Image (cartoon, coloured by chain):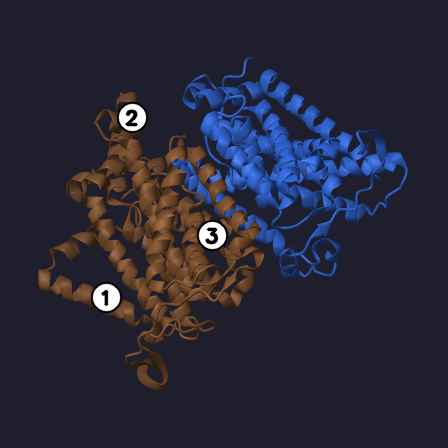
Amino acid sequence: MSFLIDNFVELTVTGLVLGAVYGLVALGYTLVYGVLQLINFAHSEVWMFGSFAAVWVTVALGVAPGSALPVVIGVLLLALLAAMTVSGGVALLLERVAYRRLIRLDAPKLVALISAIGASFALAELMGLRDRVAGWFGLRDTLDPYVRSARDNTRFQNPLETEGVFTVGGYTVSNVDIIIIVSAVLMMVALDQFIRRTRTGRGIRAVAQDSEAAALMGVNRNRIIRATFLVGGIMAGAAALLYLMRFGVTRWNAGFLLGVKAFTAAVLGGIGNVRGALLGGFVLGLAENYGSALIGSEWRDVVAFLLLVVILLFRPTGLLGESLGRARA
Amino acid sequence: MTEGKASPDTESGPARSMAWGPRLGWDRGALARRTTALPKPVKWTLIGLLVVVLYALPLLELPIISTPDTDFGGVLFTVASYVLVALGLNIVLGYAGLLDLGYVGFYAIGAYTVAVLGSLQAQLSWWLLIPLAVIVTTISGILLGAPTLRVRGDYLAIVTLGFGEIIRLTALNTEWLGAAKGITGVPRPPSVELFDVPHLEWEGATALIDLDDTTSFLSFGVADQAPYYWLTLTVIFLVLGADRMLRLSRIGRGWEATREDEDAAELMGVPTFKFKLLAFACGAFIGGLSGALFASRQGFINPESFLLLLSILFVAAVVVGGAGNRWGVIMGAIVVAYLPERFRGFEEWRLLVFGVALLLLANFRPQGLIPPRRAKRAQAVDEQLDALEEGSARA
């Protein structure tokens, strides 16, 4: 208990940082669920590919920490762009390969889940075997810095040096912490506005509300579904870079646990609810941190799952309710 | 209802013919009709032969089918325990329509009951441990089901997924349960060594009896895994019998009604919650039983044996085979368990291939390898209705 009180600020800030990442990944689950009522199991792999894209950009550019600020910002922006592009691309690929046919046939949801599980396995293994795949094309030596030790942790060399900005309650809040929390909130606001104000956003809400009626009103359902996957992927790409800036490592199977947690966050906030995703992420991140401070860090995941079970039992629609379709214009 | 009436010859447009329907793929109806049409003695002889072949599989050492790199008896045991688990999960998922992503939790509880009470904290006899494991698991299934079965379908998946992880993490973090290092010396089933049975040896197409390679009948040791396979196979036959009786009883109809439309079933006087809880308990029973068998074969368990991945493989086995059809899920379990073992030579690639295979199966055989006949009937009726609607829209 005293550990919790002594480190309250640190636990809160790191909880919010973690929660911001959960929230951004949770968006992908929430959007797809809102539109299609499907659990996009492979979304974690979308995030994982984004994280590797970010790592590869920094490896390719090879910027040492402590470079001039404009260089650092340029590299980070490029990494962000790469992560978003790759994640968005993988999300679109997923829609094409794992979902489109099943959506068209109106197959049972469970089958779509299995399809997504298969895609998730294949994508994760592909990344874990990337050295072999490069070997097929005879590129193993050329691509060595990108593909070596494919089964181990891959480090992200953050070009931005972590510096303390101000100290509260014995914890020095770093620039990275602030960047992560602020950018997650900003992206969430941008996405919220996108869904409320743009034509595509209106389409997403319409399909979420009643896809048949939306189709009758002239909404191109397939285009909207693609847009939904793309937006979710882009958010996951951003989350990947933010995660790497704070935690510094990724690996081929890192997506799984993060994906489960992010899904938990989405359900916590009310699946299908865009604002709920970020709120759910923050609540989950904080609960995990406080919980593990109280009863020991090895129980961290148990705390997360127990929280989920309790919320579902007493407030089954999540904290903010399910409302992608019902969001006011 | 006969098959002929069930699949009306509707006009099918180009899009329709792409759809999954009774006309695509292997028509199980024909095979089933042909076997039921056989005279009774012939049928029973055929079934008897099949059973004998199944029991003799580890001895036959068939070319192609046998695994070259690992003990075939062990592989067969793995396949058989997947079949058992799939049969249990089929009750929950296929009959009652409850998506349980934490089924490995029951498997783990069964295994841990045997290991903890048989080795770590007490030394109970194996004969006592198996019923104990089953009872503990069934109770845990009811305890989990009572609060969670009230939540909606998709959420149930996540709650159960959380449950599976909580079980594993609790085992990992509790010293009393062996923590990360696991539990060794799990009791094996008592051996009754009666006689030795020889294996076969193949030279081209001719089989020779290999007297040097024998399996002692019912000695549950470490090296030869065939007796464990026989034990599990026997359990599977018992479970199959019970499964058939349940399915054809009032309970089975209750499950079907609950799965198809919960509100309608409730209005018709089906106590849906009780039936769902019963399905959960039955599933937990079988899951715990297979977990207990797994632990007593392995002799050693640790939390690593019960990863979430296993739950997902179990669900994949049921859905790939055709949820709701017991022969289908058996087929699915064989696909999921056997293929990776058979192709161990491609160790590195097997999960990738498995993922792609799941993806392809889901997309091109969405009803499962052997879909339940009811699903095919419903499909045919749906198609008929669609065709009628399209017709009236055009007119």
Image mark for residue B50: 1
Question: x%, y% of residue B320?
Answer: 38, 49
Left or right side of B217 for A113 = right
Can I make out residue B235 in this image?
yes
Judge whether A297 appears above or below A267 on screen. Answer: below
**Label located before the other in sequence (2 or 1):** 1
Q: Chain of mark 2?
A: B
Question: x%, y% of residue B261?
Answer: 29, 30
Q: Residue furthest front?
A: B122
Given the image, on which type of amino acid does mark 2 rest?
Asp
Neighbour tally class for label 1: few under 14, some 14-19, many 20 plus, Cα within 10 Å: few
Q: State the quadrant of the N terminus of chain A.
A: top right
**Label located before the other in sequence (2 or 3):** 2
**Residue underneath mark 3:** B310
Residue at the image point whose x is 64% and y is 57% from the top: A151
Given the image, on which type of amino acid does mark 3 rest?
Leu
Question: x%, y% of residue A64?
Answer: 86, 46
Neighbour tally class for label 2: few under 14, some 14-19, many 20 plus, Cα within 10 Å: few
Q: Residue furthest right?
A: A68
As measured in the structure, the alpha-carbon distance from the residue carrying label 3 to the one carrying label 1 is 29 Å
Badge 3 and badge 1 in a common chain: yes
Q: Which quadrant of the structure image shows residue A176? A: top right
Image mark for residue B199: none
B358 or B84, which lies in front?
Answer: B84
